[in-house]
Image (cartoon, rainbow, N blue to C red):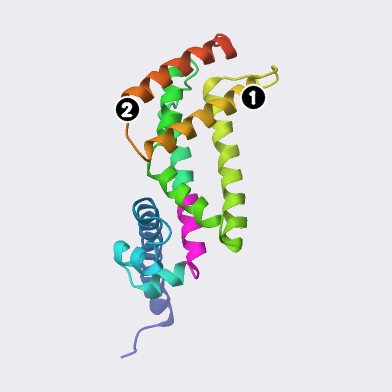
Amino acid sequence: MGGVSTVDRAERDRAERVPKQDRSRATRQRLLEAAVSCLAEHGWAGSTVSVVAERAGVSRGAAQHHFPTREDLFTAAVEYVAEERSTALRALFPEGAAGDRHAVVAALVDLYTGPLFRAALHLWVAASNEDQLRARVTELESRVGRETHRIAVDLLSADESVPGVRETVQGLLDMARGLGLANLLTDDGARRERVVEQWAGLLEGALGSVRD
């Protein structure tokens, strides 16, 4: 009566590896989400690897297996959520949104008034005093900024070959960032809606009518 064959063991090993890989991906995602939440709520000083691991429900060792350093963890976390928000922003207008610039402006403002922006702001402040972190965060922010600008151009059907249009789109993003900063201290939704309304009107004049 023979034991388990080599083929059987290989099949069993493959069956065991798949769930393990799934668990690893799930653990990594929980850590990233917990890191962003901690950074937004407690700032850099209060967001240690141990605090994030506890919030994610994993051991410190497991956290360090996925992210060997604190800088690895937090830059990856902000990048992860930034990419998620970019995907979500595009998904809001699957057929395009050039016919409703007010909705586009409101969506962009939402991008800068959510937990991602609060977390990123804490990371920027920390990076100003941490040489190693500064280089990584600067590169990340530059890339995310370019992607957000491209999304805005696409959604607004903005023709950047026209003089001043690129600056107008960037001004919109700078305005949205400013509202995000103000939102850190007080949530003034009514004022924000008035600003969104005003900018939607300005864009109609600056960008011209929407072309099919």
The span shown in magenta is: 67-79
- Decide if residue 15 is on the left or right side of residue 173: left
Q: Per the image, is 137 magenta?
A: no
126 vs 74, nearest the viewer = 126
Q: Position of residue 201 (x, y in %)?
A: 48, 12
Circle number at residue 54: none
Query: What type is the residue that disc 2 sits on?
Result: Gly
Q: Secondary structure at mark 1?
A: helix
Figure quadrant of the C terminus: top right
Q: Position of residue 82 (x, y in %)?
A: 47, 45
Q: Residue at x 36, y 22 (%)?
A: 193
Position of 57 relative to 92 (above/below): below
Which residue position is annotated with label 2? 189
Report if residue 162 is visible in the image. yes
Which residue position is annotated with label 1? 166
Query: What type is the residue that disc 1 sits on?
Result: Arg
Q: Position of residue 200 (x, y in %)?
A: 47, 16
Q: Residue at x 53, y 21 (%)?
A: 156
Q: Residue at x 43, y 18 (%)?
A: 102
Which sits earlier in the primary sequence, circle 2 or circle 1? 1
Q: Residue at x 41, y 29 (%)?
A: 92
